[in-house]
Amino acid sequence: MRQFLVFAGALALLIFVLQRGFGTAVIHPRTWLLFGFMAGLTLLTYGLTARLVAVSPTNLGVGYLVGMTIRLLASLALVTVHLARGGAHEGRGVWTFLGAFFLLYFSWVGFEIWATLSNLRPISEKQVSQT
């Protein structure tokens, strides 16, 4: 959880600095909504994976794939709803929204991959000691 909070804080600080420095030319007004959405999805998938691993350490792969699928489908639904509700008529705002979406999406996915890889050793050591 500490890694999550440090990453979320660093990412929020970066968004804040860019928003103060460049305004809406670089940062879309709904970037904070995207940030909260992605952070919530990450917490949801992390909790789901942690619960599955608590049941059995061999469930890590299943939990990770289910989490990845949930993140992908929920993110696509968010972009589709935004564009369907008039986001496609914002002119250049569409590109800043999509840019913010993809940067945040891949940042959170990268964080999840890094957090998973950093936790593989303790999980595999538990499996070896149980056999």
Image (spheres, rainbow, N blue to C red):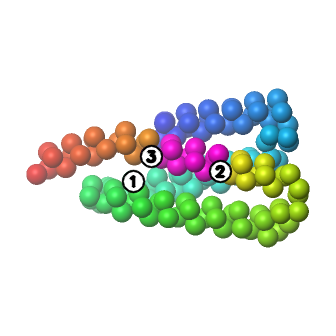
N-terminal of the pair, mark 2 or mark 1, is 1
User: Is 19 inside the magenta-drawn segment?
Assistant: no
Q: Nearer the viewer, mark 1 or mark 3?
A: 3
Q: Which residue is mark 3?
A: 113
Please name the residue that numbered disc 1 is placed on: 50
Q: Nearer the viewer, mark 2 or mark 3?
A: 2
Most foreground residue, 90 or 129:
90
Q: Is residue 20 above or below residue 46?
A: above
Question: Callout 3, which amino acid?
Answer: Ile
For the stretch drawn in magenta, what is the main secondary structure? Answer: helix
User: In terms of image quadrants, where is residue 6?
Assistant: top right
Going by the image, does 91 lie left or right of 77?
right
Residue 108 visible from this viewpoint: yes
Q: How many marks?
A: 3
User: Start and end of the magenta stretch?
Assistant: 102-113
Which residue is depicted at the point 55% across and 60% down?
Answer: 71
Q: Identity of the amino acid at label 2?
A: Phe
Residue in the image at 52% along x and 57% along y: 44
